[in-house]
Amino acid sequence: MARGSTRPTSRDVAQAAGVSQAAVSLVLGDKWRGRVSQATAERVRRAADELGYRPNLAARNLRLGHTRTVLLVVPALTTEFFAGVYTGAARVAAEHGFGVVLYPSPEGIGPARNPFASAQAALDGVIASSMAADALTAIRGDRLPLVMLDSDPEGSLGAATVNLDIADGVRQVAAHLLGLGHRGFLHLAADVPSWTFEVRARELAARVGAVPGASVRTARAAIAVEDARDATQAALSAPGPRPTAVVCDDDKLAVGAYKALRRLGLRVPEDVSVTGFDDLGLATAVDPELTTVRLDAELFGERGIRALLAVLEGRTPDGDDVPVELVVRGSTAPPRAS
């Protein structure tokens, strides 16, 4: 190949790797699985890196008829969190000449109909929350590049995974409450089969279990205020010592916990402290304002689209988790003396 200002081509990569141009296209388009070996794929990527090759996306789109459009599949549009994810993803996508179509999975989870006559022809890739994973079969098939959000990196369906540092958020909550002196915890867990909620339960149990005399019991509820209210009321009315802190998987669950405590004649935080997760707008609408873990939804969406663009270009996405932050407000305080 000519040196200097000449840009390396896919033919140069093919020659350097000792493979066909078709193989280069498959590997750098993330369509190689089942068609070329893992060793061949690694050889192609290594050759591309050494040559400084980057696919000409504009030319490829013209050739393949791609529309520079990606699909963002979320479990529901009932909170502003996923609106923030979309905002961040759409902003970065626009900077790279891509559009983002937002598609909520029916009922939050479960299979979804293909929103296009042929999604595989209309889209370049898919970004999906783990809570919407079951919606992907009809949409994606086995061909479209996929980036998973909030998904177990060890068992992800996607070519890349982008996560919030959920475990650290739970660690911050536990450290805050334990530091205030709480030892009896109620975990108001989201009744949703999702990796992100499994992480919260596992990390909270580990942190509380490591402190002598501390314990945690669990109540499950759908992510709805009424369900959370009923689950909290039942749990706090059960026999045995009453927990002094309620740790909620979601801010909406925390609002339900507030309602249950008031029904029981208990005050927040004088009698029971409450924490949430997400830092939605309603966290500052309740009284007292809610101590919760702030998740940067827009940054999360940005990371998701950047990961998908990297996959489309044959690059390795950034693997760092998106940091989270505990915001301490008026809903937490030391427990009252017995």
Image: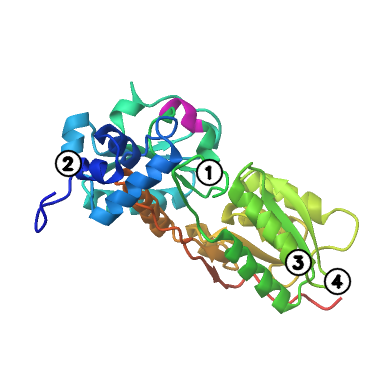
In the picture, the disc for residue 58 is: 2
Q: CA distance from mark 2 to mark 4?
A: 62 Å
Task: Assign the magenta stretch its main secondary structure.
Answer: helix
Residue indicated by mark 1: 156
Give yes or no for contact between labels 2 and 4 (Cβ–Cβ under 8 Å): no
Q: CA distance from mark 2 to mark 3?
A: 53 Å
Residue indicated by mark 4: 213
In the picture, the disc for residue 208 is: 3
Residue 253 lies, with reference to residue 292, above or below; the image says above
User: Which residue range is magenta in the image?
Assistant: 135-139
User: Mark 1 is on which residue type?
Assistant: Ser
Q: CA distance from mark 1 to mark 3?
A: 28 Å
* Residue 175 percent across, percent down from the top left: 67, 73
Task: Report the mark closest to the observer, 1 or 3.
Answer: 1
Taking depth in this image into account, of 179 and 135 the one nearest to the observer is 135
User: Mark 2 is on which residue type?
Assistant: Ala
User: Mark 3 is on which residue type?
Assistant: Val
Q: Residue 167: say if magenta.
A: no
In the figure, is residue 281 to the left or right of 180? left
User: Mark 4 is on which residue type?
Assistant: Gly
Q: Quadrant of residue 209?
A: bottom right
Q: Residue 137: say if magenta.
A: yes
Position of the C terminus by quadrant: bottom right
Q: Earlier in the sequence, mark 4 or mark 3?
A: 3
Coloration of the structure image: rainbow
Q: Helix, strand, or loop for circle 2?
A: helix
Residue located 36% across and 55% down the image: 302
Q: Helix, strand, or loop for circle 1?
A: loop
Q: Helix, strand, or loop for circle 3?
A: helix
Give yes or no for contact between labels 4 and 3 (Cβ–Cβ under 8 Å): no
